[in-house]
Image: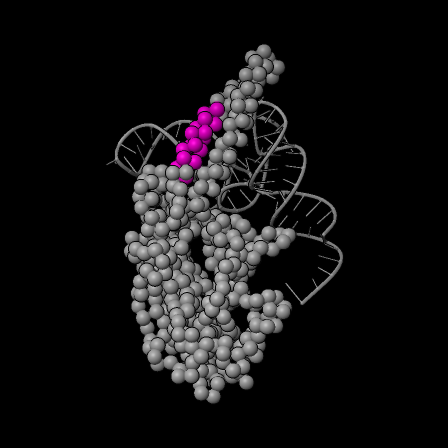
RNA sequence: GGAGAGAUGGCUGAGUGGUCGAAAGCGGCGCUUUGCUAAAGCGUUGUAGGGGUUUAAAUCCCUACCGAGGGUUCGAAUCCCUCUCUCUCCGCCA
């Protein structure tokens, strides 16, 4: 949620910023809803002030006196009027709030212009895409792949996109998660093991609702949502809280399975490990002082990059253009790993600064040393990292002539062996 | 899952229909005393929204907030209903 005051006082500034995202938002409707709500609010408040004054006067009167009875009769009409207008006010407020939820976050000045993914800027490239396995094939064509990553039985037991990981398949997932968590811990992120079902208030605070409702699994009969990312429970950890300024920045990370319905996905993007309904991911979260959030974004991106460098995987960093930025982000980098078998880049991390957009919805604030007043924090998050696509690249890029996969040194202590075998 | 009790400000806790945004204590902040610390004394102390004023900060006015939502009433922290959460006991259980 953006600051309603900013919209009210500088609608053109907001309009221009939203144009950069190429989103179609009816700002005039939002402004009209705001004006209608405030007008009614003033009516109600002045009536209530009259009620309060009468109340004080009546408290001093003996009950049953003619003056008292007359006052009751008089205030009965005011009371009815207040009730009627309060009903209208509530409706107008609800309409205004709903309208505000349709307003996206504003992009940072450093976000490049652009409309489509093709307009994203290649920020940096690392490693040598040519220097990978000569035997590389798409990972789902590796001999024995379905023994370790059993999609057929997963489909039987649950549905498409819910594979079983078996033997070395399960071990490599665990090894990657351990590697990510240990490295993140060293970088200062405190590990958290959060709930993987969240309520509607939490999903709204981080922006999944109402925007992406159809992307989440919802449970019955309790209407909880399976988390699409650990970002949701983690960000909501401090919902409705005021932190001490001295406590900032707060760094946290968490592993959770992530559940995404991925409605509308199709084609070769969804082959093998490329796109799953359930996958494992470690997420890094930061709550920071507003003045530091862009420095922190660079550090966050570097923390995610270090994980890829440690695995020896070629990757590139994209700076997302306005049109591909997303609804809630102010600025976003995507990390893409080179998949030698598929000969394409796979997104494995997204590092974003949300500024106060999530913090305002979630009411996460800090007490400013300077003013003594609560101010909104800036929240940032980034994947560190998502397992399946890193795994896909690892399998393809490191495939040996004998059909085994040579693991990077960093994974060996976590996996327990130097080679992963499909036999 | 069953039965009962409860939810008040940063914390503890009083308040059963009107002058209650809410006693008291603790904590925090400021000042005084003190060589420093400790202690004591005095003062102060939430959040949000709207409006006036101002370049702005400051400030002033109004309104809301006693777990959440609804109801009764001229008037609700207080009475009624629903929900959520916490605690105790019983049951079940990794």
What kind of secondary structure does the magenta stretch mostly adopt?
Answer: helix
The percent coordinates of residue B72 (x first, y second) are 63, 27
- Quadrant of res A299: bottom left
Q: Tell which residue pokes out farthest to the bottom in this image.
A: A402
The percent coordinates of residue A374 (x first, y second) are 40, 45
Q: Residue at x 34, y 55 (%)?
A: A115
**Left or right of A417, for residue B50:** left
Q: Residue at x 48, y 66 (%)?
A: A267
Q: As rendered, which of A274 and A179 lies closer to the eye?
A: A274
- Quadrant of res B53: top left
Q: Which residues are magenta?
A: A30-47
Q: Residue at x 40, y 33 (%)?
A: A35
Tell me, yes or no, if residue A43 can be seen here: yes
Location of residue A405 with respect to A271 vertically, above or below: below
The percent coordinates of residue B29 (x first, y second) are 37, 44
Q: As rendered, which of B75 and A109 lies closer to the eye?
A: A109
**Left or right of B36, for residue A150:** right
> Residue A126 lies in magenta, yes or no?
no
Q: As rendered, which of A23 and A183 lies closer to the eye?
A: A23
Location of residue B8 with respect to A314 vertically, above or below: above
Q: Tell which residue pokes out farthest to the top in this image.
A: A66
């Amino acid at each position: 949620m953006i600051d309603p005051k900013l919209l009210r006082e500088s609608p053109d500034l907001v309009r221009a910023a939203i144009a950069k995202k190429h989103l179609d938002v009816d700002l005039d409707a939002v402004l009209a809803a705001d004006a209608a709500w405030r007008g009614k609010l003033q009516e109600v408040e002045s009536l209530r002030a009259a009620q309060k004054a009468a109340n004080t006067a009546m408290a001093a009167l003996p009950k049953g006196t003619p003056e008292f009875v007359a006052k009751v009769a008089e205030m009965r009409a005011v009371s009815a009027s207040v009730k009627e207008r309060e009903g209208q006010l509530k409706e107008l407020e609800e309409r205004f709030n709903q309208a505000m939820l349709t307003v996206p976050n504003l992009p940072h000045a450093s976000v490049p212009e652009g409309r489509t993914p093709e307009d994203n800027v290649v920020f940096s490239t690392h490693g040598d895409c040519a220097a990978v396995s000569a035997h590389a094939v798409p990972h789902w064509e590796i001999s024995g792949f379905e023994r370790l990553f059993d999609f057929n039985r997963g489909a039987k037991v649950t549905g498409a996109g819910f594979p079983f990981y078996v033997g070395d398949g399960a071990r490599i997932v665990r090894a990657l998660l351990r590697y990510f968590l240990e490295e993140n811990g060293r970088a200062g992120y405190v590990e958290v093991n959060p709930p993987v079902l969240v309520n509607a208030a939490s999903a709204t605070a981080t922006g999944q609702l109402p925007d992406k409702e159809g992307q989440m699994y919802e449970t019955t009969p309790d209407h909880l949502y399976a988390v699409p990312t650990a970002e949701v429970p983690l960000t909501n950890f401090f919902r409705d809280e005021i932190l001490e300024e001295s406590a900032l920045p707060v760094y946290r990370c968490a592993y959770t399975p992530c559940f995404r319905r991925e409605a509308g996905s199709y084609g070769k993007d969804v082959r093998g490990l490329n796109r799953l309904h359930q996958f494992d991911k470690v997420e890094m979260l930061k709550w920071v002082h507003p003045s530091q959030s862009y420095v922190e974004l660079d550090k966050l991106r570097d923390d995610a990059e270090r994980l890829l460098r440690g695995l020896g995987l070629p990757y590139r960093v994209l700076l997302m253009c306005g049109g591909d930025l997303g609804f809630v982000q102010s600025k976003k980098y995507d990390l893409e790993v080179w998949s030698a078998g598929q000969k394409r880049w796979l997104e494995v991390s997204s590092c974003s600064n949300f500024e106060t957009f999530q913090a305002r919805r979630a009411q996460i604030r800090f007490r400013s040393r300077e003013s003594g007043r609560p101010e909104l924090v800036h929240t940032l998050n980034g994947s560190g990292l998502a397992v399946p696509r890193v795994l896909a690249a690892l399998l393809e890029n490191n495939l040996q002539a004998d059909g085994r996969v040579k693991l990077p040194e960093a994974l060996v202590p976590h996996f327990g062996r130097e080679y992963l075998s499909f036999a």
